[in-house]
Image: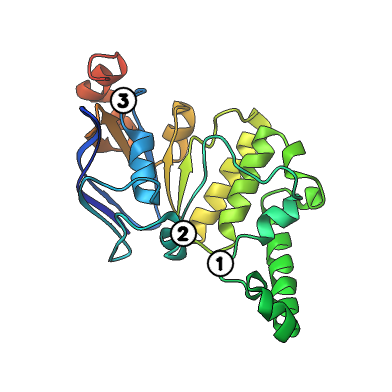
Amino acid sequence: MLELRGVVKSFGNLRAVDGVDLSIASNRITGVIGPNGAGKTTLFNLIAGSLTPDAGEIVFAGERIGGLSPDRIFQHGLARTFQIPRPFPRMTVLENTMLVPLRQAGERFWTNWWQPGLVAREEKAGRERATEVLSFCGLGGHLDHLAGTLSGGQQKLLELARVLMIDPKMILLDEPAAGVNPTLMETLVEKILALHAQGVTFLLIEHNMDLVMRICRPIVVMAAGKVIFQGDPDEIQRHPEVLDAYLGHAAA
C-alpha cells in the first residue's frame, strides 16, 4: 500500500532520513521503532506531507504522493494523528469531528444562500457520522464537551475519531501510547485492532515496546536515518544490530 524508494531528507549537514527503502503491506499494523534521533518522526512528516523529500519517491496506493500538501494526501485516504493531540480546544468534541470532511458545501458562503437544503443535508449527515465514530471511540458521552477539557488519552481518541470521518485506507499513528493512562490505552488498542479487522492499515511510531511487540507485525527498526532491520518481534529481540542501536552505539 505504501512504498518509499531511496527517500532522503537533510537539515543542513544532518541526514535525518538517509536513503530509506520501505514497503508497507496493506491490512497490517506495522510498527516503527528506534532510538531518539533515528529519523522516525521525520519519516512520518515526509509521508504525511509536512515535509518534502530531497530525493526519492513515496508511493501510496499506486500514486506518487511525495511533495504533495498534507490536505491532498489526506484526500487520498492517508491520515495521521500526532504525538501531542491538536484539537480545537474551544470547540466541542462533536464540532471538532464534524469539520473534518473535505469540500463541504457550507464552506462556500454563497451556497448557504442559494442551496440551503444541500448544506442542511450535508450537515445532518456529518453530524450522524461524527456521532457514530465518536461513539465507536468511546467518546459518545462527551459530544458537547469542549475538546480542551478532555484528558490526554481522550484527546488521542478524538484524533482517531477525526481521521475516521474520511474512512481512511491507512492511518499513521505517532506515539499513541505517550501520556495515556493504562485504561485508555487498552481502549485505544481495542479500537486499533477493531479497525484493522475491518481492513484499515496502520503504521505507527511507538516507544512503548510492550505495545509494539503485542500488536505490530512487522516491526521496522531505524537508526541514524536508516532502516537497519525489519522483522517479527522474536527476530527483532535477537538481532545484534537492533540491540546495538538501543545500547546507543548506532544512535545519532
The mark that comes first in sequence, 2 or 3, is: 2
Q: Residue at x 66, y 33 (%)?
A: 152
Residue 42: name its quadrant.
top left
Marks 2, 3: nearer the viewer:
2
Please rate how many residues cluster around mark 1, counting C-alpha atoms within 10 Å: few if below 14, some from 14 to 19, many from 20. Answer: few
- Tag 3–tag 1 contact (CB < 8 Å): no
Kindly check if marks 2 and 1 are in contact, taking CB atoms under 8 A apart as contact: yes
**Residue 249 numbered mark, or none:** none
Q: Is residue 138 left or right of residue 26?
A: right
Mark 1: secondary structure: loop
> In the image, what residue type sits under mark 3?
Gln
Q: Which residue is mark 3?
A: 237
What kind of colouring is applied to the model shown?
A: rainbow
Q: Secondary structure at mark 3?
A: helix
| Depth check, front residue: 205 or 127 | 127
Query: Which residue is pictured at 43% across the width and 55% down the height?
Result: 70
Q: Is residue 236 left or right of residue 162?
A: left
Inspect this view and state whether residue 133 appears. no
Quarter of the rendering occupied by the C terminus:
top left
Dot 1 corresponds to which residue? 102
Q: Position of residue 139 (x, y in %)?
A: 73, 48
- Indicate the secondary structure of the residue bearing disc 2: helix
Q: Whole-Å distance between the Cαs marked 2 and 3?
A: 38 Å
- Residue pointed to by mark 2: 71
